[in-house]
Structure formats: structure tokens, C-alpha cells
Image: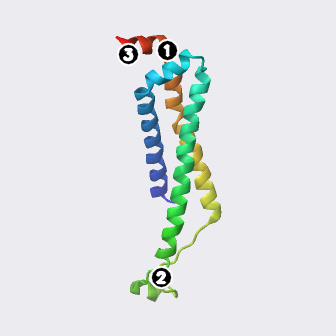
Amino acid sequence: MSFVLYMVILVGCFSITITLVLAVRRKAREMAILRAIGLRRRDLGLLYLFKGGSIGVIGVALGLSLGLFALQFISKIPLPILQEAYSGRGLPVLVSWQDLVVVSLGSVLLSIVASVWPALEVMKIDPVETLSDRAA
């Protein structure tokens, strides 16, 4: 696996974290209302962990689908320069299913880890303070 893959996963994790932190701040009033009607802090935190995991699963599914679809076309592109080095007509493509599984599971796990900070942020929301600040 390459450095580029790790960088793409890292950027994805930062994107998930930033998106969820902004969602927590933008929806602080709604989260405070949920807390005021009895939802526990832990449940709000789990909600954001689930959101992060869902984003990871959807991202992995789309990435795998589009990537494997693109590989079908890349392997059929005739490149005259490569015909001297390789016996086939197109670009050689090798898909390791073990690597796909490891990277997919790792990406989903990292997306859940990336949502820990937003989950902790939403757990800190004080309903009384948040609702009184917004009303004034």
C-alpha cells in the first residue's frame, strides 16, 4: 500500500472530524433540546460515533465501487509504450482482495475514531446554558 493511499485516508478522517464538529456547533440548540427532554450524554455521543461510522461505510462502498469499475477500463486502455514491456494490450492491474478488506475495515475504523472528538463535544453541551444563550 502506498503513501498516497495513507494520505487520502488521513484527509478523509480530517474531513469527517471537521464536518461533524461543525454539525455539533451548528446544531447545538437541537442537541440541547434533546438533552432537556431526557436523552443521555452517552446517547448523543453514540449518535455522533454512528454518524462517523456511517460516513466511513458509505465512503468505502462508493470508493470500492467506483475504483473497481475504473479498473475495468484502465486494464483495457492500450498503451504502445507498455506493449514492449508487458505482453498484454492494456495496463496491468492486480487487485488484492486481502488489501481491499484491510483498507476498507481500517478506513471505517478510522472514520469512527475521527468522530470521537465531535462525540465528546456534543456530550459537553449544557442544555440550560445553550438554550438560554440562544433565547437572549
- Find residue 131 and report its horizontal and vertical position in percent: 43, 14
Up-down: is 123 above or below 129? below
Does 136 sit left or right of 131 as displayed? left
Up-down: is 7 above or below 15? below
Amino acid bearing label 2: Gly
Up-down: is 103 above or below 88? above
| Residue 124 can be seen, yes or no | no
* Pointer 2 local density, CA inside 10 Å: few below 14, some 14–19, many at least 20: some
- Find residue 45 and report its horizontal and vertical position in percent: 57, 28
Dot placed on the residue nearer the N-terminal end, 1 or 2:
2
**How has the structure been colored for display?**
rainbow
| Residue 97 can be seen, yes or no | yes
Q: Quadrant of residue 52?
A: top right
* Pointer 1 local density, CA inside 10 Å: few below 14, some 14–19, many at least 20: some
Amino acid bearing label 3: Arg
Up-down: is 109 above or below 22? below
- Find residue 68 and report its horizontal and vertical position in percent: 54, 67
**Separation of marks 1 and 3 at Cα, in angstroms:** 11 Å
Dot placed on the residue nearer the N-terminal end, 3 or 2:
2
Dot placed on the residue nearer the N-terminal end, 1 or 3:
1
Amino acid bearing label 1: Pro
